[in-house]
Amino acid sequence: MATMVKKSISCADTAKLLRSALKAQFPNDKFSVRSDTYAGGASIRVRWVDGSYVADVEKIAKRYEGATFDGMQDLKEYQSDLVYFEGESVPTLVRYGSDFVFTDRDLSPEYVEQLSIEAQKLLDEHSETAGQVFALNERMLHGVGLPTSFGVIDHPYALGWNIVRFLSHHIPPKGA
């Protein structure tokens, strides 16, 4: 009877596995996969421009997390996964070296323009926002965030940016 093998995979090697999995699942996207180790643990950051939706990438990426965090208890717990490696008949209990995997999808100026046109159409459809001109400033475009003086809904820029972010989860870039 075969016994289960246990294996720890370093954060850098976990990043390599994740990069390969993303490339196989999303061959048309170019991902930046970077690992970082520090005193309190390790993490991987995945970045890409336009391309696949965040939720789809996270379905793959989150499989490579070696820990969970419960904010209610301020508790980090480690987790392992059963993995079948090629040529082996017994699964291996794997502990990935990255505690967490973070994903960041950037939007190109061309894609933002495409989404801005759609956002303007949505603004024009509602009486509260009809006639307001939709425009994004550089701070919003590069992810710095909305100025704190803007409300979430009561300012056309804020409303427009929320619409663009929403649309980016539902409308693919042209040519994708």
Image (spheres, helix red, strand yellow):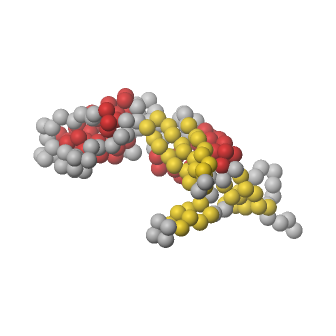
Q: Position of residue 11 (x, y in %)?
A: 66, 49
In the drawing, does residue 22 fall left or right of residue 169?
Answer: right
The residue positioned 70% from the left and 50% from the top of the image is 10
Q: Position of residue 6 (x, y in %)?
A: 76, 61
* Viewer-closest of 132 and 43: 43
Give the quadrant of the N terminus.
bottom right
The residue positioned 45% from the left and 41% from the top of the image is 105
In the drawing, does residue 34 fall left or right of residue 107?
Answer: right
* Viewer-closest of 133 and 14: 14
* Viewer-closest of 72 and 153: 72
Q: Residue furthest right?
A: 1
The residue positioned 39% from the left and 45% from the top of the image is 169
In the drawing, does residue 131 fall left or right of residue 157?
Answer: left
The residue positioned 69% from the left and 58% from the top of the image is 95
Q: Residue furthest bottom?
A: 73
Q: Quadrant of residue 76?
A: bottom right
Q: Is residue 120 above or below residue 63?
A: above
Q: Position of residue 167 (x, y in %)?
A: 34, 43
Q: Position of residue 23 (x, y in %)?
A: 61, 38
- The answer to whether one can see residue 15 in this image is yes
Q: Is residue 171 above or below residue 68?
A: above
- The answer to whether one can see residue 91 in this image is no
Q: How many marks?
A: 0
